[in-house]
Image: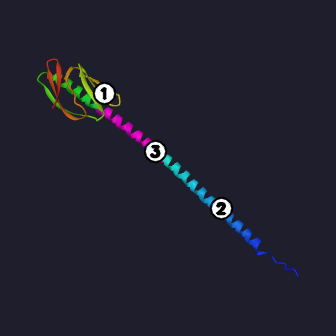
Amino acid sequence: MKHNSFSVYPINAGLNSIAKRFNQQKTCMKGQVSVELLIIIGIGVGIISLYIIYSYNALYSYKVNNDVSLVKSSLEKIAETANDVAFQGEPAKQKINICFPLILKNCSIVNKTLSCSLNNGKEIHQDSKINLNGTLPGSGCWDLILEAKNGFVNITIS
């Protein structure tokens, strides 16, 4: 007599096959999640980097404009004070305080013109109504003495 029973082996083999496939899909899903997370983090880092670069450029531009403005106002102050001292005549004298930024390369006085050049290549000029003589200091804050002479104003560092 033949016994008709189902073999347990084919059922177990089928379940093992399904379990293996499930584990493979689970591993693939973990890999996919990791790749997606890396993509999201990469996009976030890219956005933050762009923001930092933009902020740095804006801050640098502000600093350069501020330095140029500081040099212009210092040269205007010297020219205006020289005009006032010259108007009063000899032996008038006046002491002023000026500040030049760190990016100042050099300054010079030629006849009636004060000029300064900056490290970034910009040139700043200021004209006076009277001839000027003397030297201008470098970077930093300085006291200058402007003294009226016969036909010109002498500028000295105090």
Q: Which residue is mark 3?
A: 51
Residue 24: mark in rendering = 2
Is 72 on the left or on the right of 31, as rendered?
left
Could you tell which of marks 3 and 2 lies nearer the N-terminus?
2
Crowding at dot 1, Cα within 10 Å, few <14 / some 14-19 / many 20+, comes out as: some
Q: Position of residue 119 (x, y in %)?
A: 33, 31
Q: Is residue 49 left or right of residue 29?
A: left
Residue 64 image-quadrant placement: top left
7 over 142 or under it: above or below = below
How crowded pointer 3 is (Cα within 10 Å; few <14, some 14-19, many 20+) is rated as few
Q: CA distance from mark 1 to mark 2?
A: 70 Å
Residue kind at label 1, given as amino acid type = Ser
Q: Residue furthest front?
A: 1
Q: Which residue is mark 1?
A: 117
Tell me whether the residue at label 3 lies in contact with that at label 1, contact meaning CB atoms closer than 8 angstroms.
no
Residue placed most toward the observer, 60 or 66: 60
